[in-house]
Image (cartoon, rainbow, N blue to C red):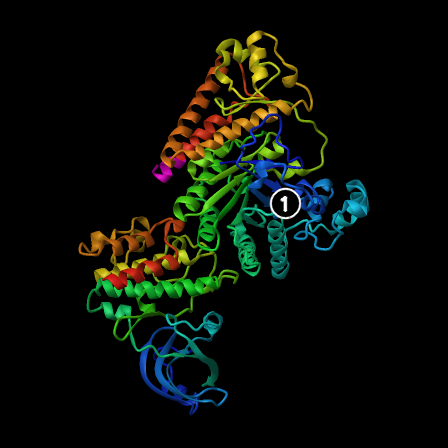
Amino acid sequence: MFTQTTFPATEANAALGPRFQVGLLIRSGGQGAVYRATRTSTPDGKIVADDCAIKYYFDSAQDRRVDREIRALEGFRHPNLANVLEHGHFDLRGETVRFVVWDYIDGEPLDTRLRSGAVSAKIVACVGRDAARAIDHIWSKRIVHRDVAPKNIMLRRGDAEAVLIDLGLARHLLESPLTAPGFTWGTYGYLSPEQCRAEPNLTCHSDVFSLGVSLQEALAGRHPTRGDQQALVGRPPKTSDLVRSAPAALAEAIDRMLSLRAPFRPLPSQLVACFAELAAEL
Amino acid sequence: MFYYNAKYAFALPGQAPTAIAGGIISAAAMPAGQLLRRSFRKFPYLQHRLFDPQVYLSTLDSHVAASTVVNLASWPWFCPGAAPEYDSDTHTSLKNWKDTYGGTLLQSWPGCAHTDSQTISDACVAAIRVQLELGCEMVILPGPLTNLATHHFVSETEWIDAGIEACKALKVSQPALATVAISDSVLRGVDPTENPLLHTISNQVSARPELAGVYLLPEMASENGYVCTSRDTLLSMLLLIDDFVRGAGKRVVMNYVGTFGAVASAAGASVWSSGYYRGQRRLRLADFEDQIGRAMPRYHSPKLAGDIGLEHDIQEAYKQYGDRLLIDTKDGATLTRALESGTYPPAEWEYAQSNVTAASGHYVEVAYRLGRLATQSPDKRIETVQRWLEGAVHWVGNLQKIGITGSAQTELTHQVVWLDAFTNWRNQAGL
C-alpha cells in the first residue's frame, strides 16, 4: 500500500499513457492524490480536449468504496455534481492503483475559501441552492452522500455556482453497510444526529443537516460550535446568534435544516426553491 | 374525520349516521372477484373509500387462518395466478369457488412477505391497479408488518419505493399513502422518545416527497382486550403522527385504533377508522385465526372512553349516577328509556349472543361524533381531548367507588394510560 509520501506520482502519471497530460497536484491526503490533467482522447479513441482531475487511490483495501463512488456517479450528469469521465487501474511496483477521472472544476473548495473569512449571504444562498440540488438529485436515486462538509463543496470561479464532490462515502439505501454496527462515517463536526446515533439507514435529511452546518460556517466564517460535534447535536446554535446581520429568511432556512428531529428538516427540493429565491433577492 | 372500517357487510349497523365521512375496505374481507363486482352506490359513506391491500398479513399461517388466507390469496399481490377470480356466472356460488380452489390457494400462500425485488414491484403494481379500479380517493401502498427492530425498516422501505415507482408507472393522480404497520412487540418496553426504530421510520417516510401521507396501523400482538393499554405503543403512535404531520407536512390515516382515534386526531391524524366488532377496533394477527365465536353487545360510553358491561354494571352505574354516563344516540335511546323506566333490558340491548345491532349502531354514532373533532382548530382539539381523557379517568374513579371493577365487559384500565400517553406527547411536542 502506498502512502502520501511513498506514492510515485511521476511513474503513475506515465502509467496512464499518452492520452493524458498530467499537470499540478491539486490536493493529497491519506487515501489518495488528485492531479489536474488534460485528456486528449477517450478510451475508445475519440479525440477530445477535456480539462479533468485525476484521483489516484493509494489503498486497494478501499476498492469497494471506490467502486461505490464510481457506481454512484456513473449514471449521473448533473451540473452540481462532479461527473465521472472514466476510471480504471494499473499495476505499479507490485501494487494495483485505482484511478478515477473527473470533470475539472475551476474553483476552490469552500473550506479553503473560508480560511480567509466568511463569505457573503448571497454566496451562502448560492451554495445552499446548488448543494441542495445535488443532494436532491442523488436522493432521487436513494443515495445519501453522508459527508457533506465545506471540504466537499467546490465553489466555481466567480462564486455563482457550487458543486458537491467526493461521493466516496455515499451509500444506496439497499446496499449493505461497509461500516461495522455502531460505527459511522462522515466528518466530525458535520455529522447529523442520526449519524451520531450510528443509524444504519440514513436519508437526505442527514445531508441536509450537514449542509446546514456548512452554510452556518460559511456565513459566520467559523465552525458554529468550533468543531464540537456533541454541542452541535445537543443544541445547535441559532444562525442569528452567530451572525447578527444575517438576513432573517436565510437564517430561518438554515435553522430549520438543523432541526434535531429529521422529519422537521426541509427536503432538498424545498431548499432549492427557498435558496434560489434568496440568491436572487440578496 | 371518522371513517367506518367496513368488513364484509358494507351496510352501516343499526341507525348509524349515514353522514359518515368515508370507509376503509380490506382485502381480507372477501375474495377479489366478489369485491370487484360489488356496487358502492348504495352506501353513501363509501363514496369516499380506501382499500387496504393488507400485505402486513403475509405471515398468517394458512393452517390456522385458512378462511382469511383464502380471501387474501385470491388477490394478485399475494398469489398471482393461483386461481381464477370468483365469478358467479362461472362458479355458481362462492362456496363452490372456495371448494374448488381453496386448497390451491392455501398451498400457494407464501406465509411471508415477498422479498424478491421484481415480485415486490409486481405486487405493488397489482395492488395499486385494483385501488384505481375500485375508485379509491387515495392509494394505499402495500407494505409488510414491522415486527423486527433489528431489520431497521429496510424491507419496508423497499416496498415503499416499489409502490412509488408503481404509482409513476400507472400515472396515479390520487395521493399515495405508505403503509406503516408496526407490531407492539417492537414498541413495548422501549422509551418511545429514544426508540431508534421510530426515528428510522419517521425519517424514511418523511424523506419521500412522492408520499402524501401514511396509513398507520398498530398491531396489538400483546393485548387481550379491545383497546390498547400500552403507554409505549400509544405514545409511539402519537410521536410518529407528530413527525409526519407537523414535521413533514404529510397526512395520516389511522386504522384499528378504536376511539383512541380521537386522540390521534388531536395529534394531527386527518382520518381514523374503527367499527363495533373487535376485529374492527384492533389489529391483531391472532384474531385472523379461525375460531368460532359470537359477539356480545357492549355499551360504549364516550364519557368513560370505554365500554361498560350490560349484564350488571350499567344498571349499578345508573342507580348511582343517573344518565350521566350515557349518551343520546338513536340506537342508545331504547337503553336509556329502559333504565329510566326500570324496564331494563330492552330487547335490542339484551345481553345475548349476536344481539349487537343496536350496540353496533350506537358505537358507530359515538365514533362519528368523536370524528367531528376534526372540525375544531388544532389547538382547540388538543384541549378538548385533554378534558375528555381527564373526564374519563375521573369516571373510572367514580365507578370504582361504587364497587365496579374492570372486566372483559367494563373497561377501566386504559383511560389513565391514554391520558398519560397524550400528556407525554404534549410535553414532547411542546404543545
In what element is the residue under mark 1? helix
Q: Locate residue B121, reporting x and y percent.
A: 60, 59
* Residue sticking out furthest to the top: B342
In this picture, is B340 found above or below B30? above
The residue nearer to you, when weighing A29 against B34, is B34
Q: Is residue B357 left or right of residue A266?
A: right
**Rendered view: A258 above or below A48:** above
Q: Report the span colored magenta.
A: B425-431
Residue placed at 69% from the left, 22% from the top? B353
Residue A207 position (above or below residue B431): below
Q: Is residue B221 visible?
A: no
Q: Residues within 10 Å of mark 1 (few under 14, many from 20)?
A: many
Q: Which residue is mark 1?
A: B57
Q: Residue at x 38, y 30 (%)?
A: B383
Residue B112, position as x, y percentages in the image: 65, 50
Residue B353 in sight here: yes
Image-based side of B47 in relation to B102, left or right = left
Q: Would residue A126 be found to the left or right of residue B101 on screen?
A: left
Quadrant for residue A81, please give it.
Answer: bottom left
Question: B338 and A75: which one is in front?
Answer: B338
Task: Name the chief secondary structure element in magenta.
Answer: helix
Chain ID of residue with mark 1: B
